[in-house]
Amino acid sequence: MDAGASKPRLQVVSTARRAWRNLDAMFERAFARWRTRPSIAVRISWLWPLAWVAAIAILMLTVDQIAGELRHSWPLWLLIPALHLTDVGLSGWYLLPATAVVAAACLIDWTKLPRRGKALLANWTALAFLVLVGIGLSGLVQIYLKSVFGRARMRYFDELGAFHFEPNYFDDDLSSFPSGHSATMGAFAAIVALLFPSTRVFVIPFAVLVSLTRVVTRAHYPSDVVAGFGLGFAGALAAAFLFARMGLVFRGTQVGFVKRRSGFRLFPRRRGSAGEATRPAAPFPAGLSSK
């Protein structure tokens, strides 16, 4: 009786130990790559952040007041779709699946996987960490900035106007600047555009559209949206450079930017397909713990 009851408990303990050792091995390999690989020259013009700040300032001084006055004038055919589409910007849609992938990678016994399976799981795990860092980092920054600026939301325009700033401790009514949904969409747009450059003509406009719904739904002013979107885009771009330094997902280019690694694939190729790599590029190869 006791022996039968203790067996599931031992399995749980063994699985927990394997998960911890796998996670530890992932970070150990990532830091080893960071220490041994050369740095990447970053050549991004300072005009981009300057233009971003200028756009925020111009919108705040001009368009925000107009948006506040027109907040009740949006037609229903625009307001109703915006109310449904705006939730696409919730960070949980992206962070929770990424967390699930990392958790699965920690629980799996990598030593029992075939070589190609290890490579694909490694790529999925690296992508999940990229999402967690790219979206999560900008998310933490925007939460902090919301408290620092304490801008009143658009729904209080009549009482407080468009320029009421009151630093606070995470008061949702005073958390307008910057927009968290827009930060998520900016990071999402950057990650997808970098991974699949041919999709940028669709992904970036879609992300901008979702971000603009925050104005239509009276949750944010236009300057909040631009601030959040730029913050998220920059955070994801910084994460991409960080991962390129470690040789995960991306690699550095000669022009000082990043590009998806040729060995990074999320799905197996058909047998005998042209140009198939003989050695999959896996950031977390076979040595992960099985104990």
Image (tube, rainbow, N blue to C red):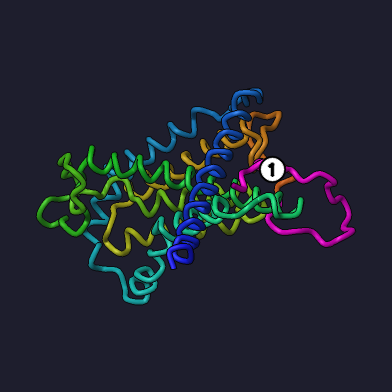
Amino acid type at mark 1: Pro
Which residues make up the magenta segment? 265-291
In the picture, residue 58 is in which quadrant? top left
Q: Which residue is drawn at 44% across and 35% down?
A: 51
Vertical side of 203 occupied by 258: above or below: above
From this view, report whether residue 21 is shown above or below residue 36: below
The stretch drawn in magenta includes residue 288: yes
- According to the picture, the residue beneath numbered tag 1 turns out to be 285
**Front one among 264 and 175:** 264
Count of numbered tags: 1
Residue 112, quarter of picture: bottom right
Disc 1 is placed on an element classified as: loop
Magenta residues, dominant SS class: loop
- Please indicate, yes or no, whether residue 176 appears anywhere in the rendered image: yes
Residue 127 rendering spot, x and y as whole percentages: 58, 49
Residue at 79% from the left image edge and 59% from the top image edge: 269
- Seen in the image, is 162 located left or right of residue 258? left
* Residue 275 on the magenta segment: yes
Q: In this view, does 111 lie above or below 11?
A: above
**Residue extending farthest bottom:** 77
**Residue at horizontal 66 percent and vertical 50 percent from the top:** 110
Q: Foreground residue, 56 or 240? A: 240
Where, quadrant-wise, is the N terminus in this rendering?
Answer: bottom left
- The percent coordinates of residue 184 (x first, y second) are 43, 51
Residue 207 visible here: no
